[in-house]
Amino acid sequence: MAGREFYYNLATGEVEEGKVHGATNRMGPYPTPEAARAALRQAEERNEKWDAADAAWEEDTEE
């Protein structure tokens, strides 16, 4: 599987091999289809973590 790239298409919710569609609706590249499939969930989890860290920082600076 070396050299193959997989992308998660935000518009269709599908995993695609290679740059099938434009970059505006594409996340990746990822080394495997499974990694591409998990991309959106991982991004959401990361965003939630960052939002919580931002909220904690804002609380600390208000004191």
Image (tube, rainbow, N blue to C red):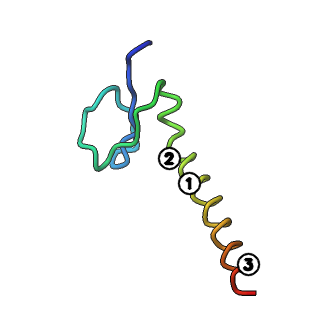
- Which of the two discs, 3 and 1, sits closer to the camera? 3
Going by the numbered disc 2, the residue's amino acid type is: Leu
- Name the residue tied to disc 2: 40
Q: Is residue 2 left or right of residue 54?
A: left
| Label 3 close to label 1 by CB (< 8 Å) | no
Q: Nearer the viewer, mark 3 or mark 2?
A: 3
User: Can you tell which quarter of the image residue 49 is in?
Assistant: bottom right
Helix or strand or loop: what does disc 1 sit on? helix
The residue wearing badge 1 is 44
Instruction: Place residue 60 in its image quadrant.
Output: bottom right
Q: Position of residue 26 (x, y in %)?
A: 34, 43
Residue at image location 47% in from the left, 25% down from the top = 31
Tell me residue 55's x, y (percent). 66, 73
Horizontal side of residue 9 vs 21, given as left or right: right
What residue lies at 52% left-to-right and 32% top-to-bottom?
35
> In the displayed structure, does residue 46 sit left or right of residue 12?
right
Assess disc 3: are there few (<14), some (14-19) or many (≥20) residues with their C-alpha within 10 Å of its C-alpha. few
| Vertical side of 31 occupied by 42: above or below | below
Q: Is residue 19 above or below residue 63?
A: above
Q: CA distance from mark 2 to mark 1?
A: 6 Å
Residue 15 percent coordinates (x, y): 40, 34
Q: Are marks 2 and 1 in contact (CB under 8 Å)?
A: yes
User: Which residue lies under the disc numbered 3?
Assistant: 60
Kind of residue indicated by mark 3: Asp
Q: Quadrant of the C terminus?
A: bottom right
The residue located at (71%, 72%) in the rendering is 56
User: Which tag, 3 or 2, sits closer to the chain's start?
Assistant: 2
- Which numbered tag is attached to residue 15? none
Whichever of labels 3 and 1 marks the residue nearer the N terminus, that label is 1
Secondary element at tag 3: helix
> Would you call the spot at circle 1 few (<14 residues within 10 Å), some (14-19), or many (20 or more)?
few
